[in-house]
Amino acid sequence: MSEIMTKTKLKNLLRSMADYRRGLRLLTGQPKLDVVIICPLRDEAERSRYFKATATRSCQQNGARLHLKGVAGQVRLLNVTTEELVQPDSRELAKQAVIAALDWAQQQGAKVVLLAAAMQSLFGGDGRALKQRFPSLLLTLGQNGRSQLLCAEIDRALRRSSFVTQPPRILVLEPDTLLGQAVCAHLQAKGRQVVALSTSQRMAATLQQQTGMPVYPQVSAVGAVDVVVVCGDSLPLATDDIAALRRSNRKLLVIDQSTVAAVDQHVSQQCQSLLVRLEGGNGFASGLNMVPGRLSYRQLRLSRGSMVGDVAEAMALFHAVYQDHNHLVLNRDWFDVNPYNQALLAEAFYSLRVGLPNPHSFGKPVNDFGLELNPMTVARTLIQQVAAPGAIQHGLN
């Protein structure tokens, strides 16, 4: 326990020593922070890195600091995992932790606060009560930014992949999320062949009725697809699911998340000859500085100069309102994902020089988008399937 705390204190000390920009802000009378990013923990492993075993759920820790063209941001970690956010006995504690983090953000002088999208259900869909309680803060879920960058990543990946003989069949995981709805609308507007997977029967029926898009309850019902787009963090894909979804003579293109991956490193390594995985929804800015640098990028599973799209949105919103003085941005509801918000954000991204990062997967570049399997790989896969009859179990448990 003491070793964990010593490491935490050492990280905080190194972060403070490395962040000379923070010192300059204090010397020039600026607020400590412009943007605060409030995040739950991914899992218990991340909890053990930031909190001692006896820490209560009300404890909080600072994560990475970000600086981009005069905008200063700070990650604020809650001692609550993403899974605990949806558990009835943890929700009230999580709500109190978010409110405490918002109080802290105000004390630091922040004007824009990003709440992780998983926290939306804690305060109702529109977050009205939270906005009324903190009227001086511009609150956002960051989903306009993430969806805009994810859609751009999808378009780029489809251009780079070879779909000459027939248009790709695209599967969207979790189409009922804000991100999933935006991605489905984007792909349907482009005339793409889109199907979806949702474990909520009620949402599946509603989506199918509203969009005319086939929505399936499990992997075994989907059939073969060419591309999978991940729009949530509650439907992981196992090796058997990859086998069930891909065409027999082609690799499967998976556009995943860098935050909570649907195809984790273990599965990605096992299926490396049958899969092209890249991370979507991230932004890149050459002027981005993250403290403490390489360690932060590695912990966040990002390439240098990259940030998650919702973080990019929060930084861009502060830039638009308080540096470019665009008060149209200030008066919008950033819990809502819509074309007008995305148009405003596109201008802010352009002004802040935020664009797409080079394709990456788990911090490594992705250069080969060829999806055709060579005959040897096809033969080897068939032999493995014959050698292990019944091994492929379709569906998500």
Image (spheres, rainbow, N blue to C red):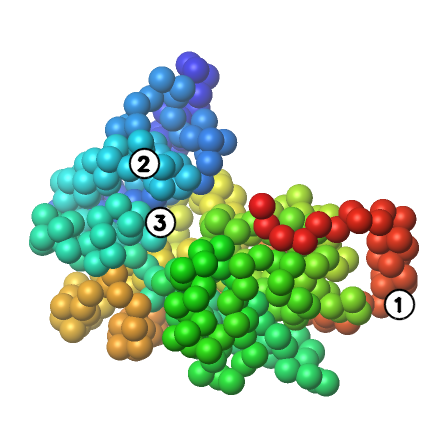
Pointer 1: residues within 10 angstroms few (<14), some, or many (20+)?
few
Q: Residue at x 72, y 57 (%)?
A: 243
Q: Which is nearer the eye, 67 or 357? A: 357
Q: Which residue is mark 1?
A: 375
Which residue is pictured at 60% across the width and 79% down the height?
159
Q: Quadrant of residue 171?
A: bottom right
- Nearer-the-camera pick, 367 or 339: 339
Q: Is 223 rendered above or below residue 213? A: above
Q: Which mark is residue 88?
A: 2
For numbered disc 1, what is the local secondary structure?
Answer: helix
Q: Earlier in the sequence, mark 1 or mark 2?
A: 2
Q: Amino acid at mark 1?
A: Pro
Report the side of 295 relative to 380 (left or right).
left
At x 29% / y 57%, what residue is drawn? 141
> Which residue matches tag 3?
118
Q: Is residue 306 visible?
A: no
**Mark 3 in CB contact with mark 2 (< 8 angstroms):** no
Give the residue type that dot 3 points to: Ala
Determine whether label 3 and label 1 are within 8 Å by CB: no
Q: Residue at x 34, y 53 (%)?
A: 117
Circle 3 — which element? helix
Between the C-alphas of marks 3 and 2, the distance is 14 Å
State the residue in front, 180 or 269.
Answer: 180
Inspect this view and state whether residue 379 appears. yes
Q: Is residue 157 left or right of residue 32?
A: right
User: In the drawing, what numbered circle is on residue 109?
Assistant: none
Mark 1 vs mark 2, CA separation in Å: 52 Å
Total marks placed = 3
Residue 1, by quadrant, is top left
Q: Quadrant of residue 168?
A: bottom right
Q: Amino acid at mark 2?
A: Pro
